Image: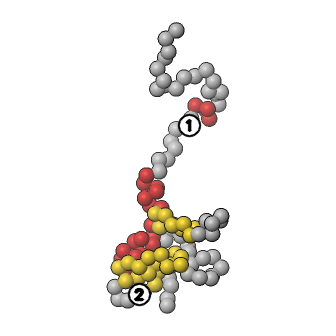
């Protein structure tokens, strides 16, 4: 079999291989060789698309393979654009968050 990495794969350990004229398999090839892990078999173009957006890594504690859709996580994970009041040099003490209404005496 000819295992080849997709051109724009996020993970250097992801490989695809031809199953037949219509389908490709997607595998995870661990660092240092060893056993390949079959992740999915899909129609040709779908296999390449899936392989490009996935990321995977071995969990250091369980030694299990974790697989996630990196493209989807980037879309739903907000990026930090503003600094918090505490990181701007002030102590943050004595301040009330803007959303907290004042209390009556």
Residue 37 visible in image: yes
Which residue is painted at 52% across and 9% down in the image?
Answer: 105
Give the vertical position of 1 relative to 41 (above or below): below
Q: Position of residue 99 (x, y in %)?
A: 46, 26
State whether residue 6 appears in this view: no
- Taking the view exactly as shown, the residue that stands out farthest to the top is 105
* Residue at point 52%, 44% (across, down): 80
Q: Secondary structure at mark 1?
A: loop
Residue situated in front as seen by the camera: 38 or 50: 38
Of callouts 1 and 2, the N-terminal one:
2
Which picture quadrant has residue 19? bottom left
Front residue of 62/36: it is 62
Would you name the residue on which mark 1 appears? 83
- Where is residue 62 drawn, in percent x and y? 63, 66
Q: Is residue 64 above or below residue 104?
A: below
Residue 76 lies, in percent from the top left, at 43, 52
| Position of residue 69 measured from the top left corner of the image (x, y, whole percent) | 46, 63
- Label number found at residue 19: 2
Left or right side of 51 for 22: left
Q: Residue furthest front?
A: 62
Q: Rounded to the nearest whole Å, what is the CA distance between mark 1 and mark 2?
A: 51 Å
Left or right of 26, for residue 43:
left
Residue visible at 63% across and 76% down? 31
């Amino acid at each position: 079999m000819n295992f080849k990495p997709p051109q724009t794969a996020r993970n250097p350990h992801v490989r695809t291989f031809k199953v037949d004229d219509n389908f490709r398999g997607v595998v995870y090839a661990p660092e240092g060789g060893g056993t390949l892990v079959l992740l999915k078999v899909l129609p040709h173009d779908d296999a390449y698309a899936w392989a490009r957006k996935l990321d995977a890594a071995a969990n250091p504690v369980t030694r299990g393979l974790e697989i996630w859709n990196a493209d989807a996580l980037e879309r739903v994970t907000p990026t930090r654009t503003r600094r918090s009041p505490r990181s701007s040099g002030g102590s943050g003490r004595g301040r009330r968050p803007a959303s907290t209404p004042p209390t009556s005496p």
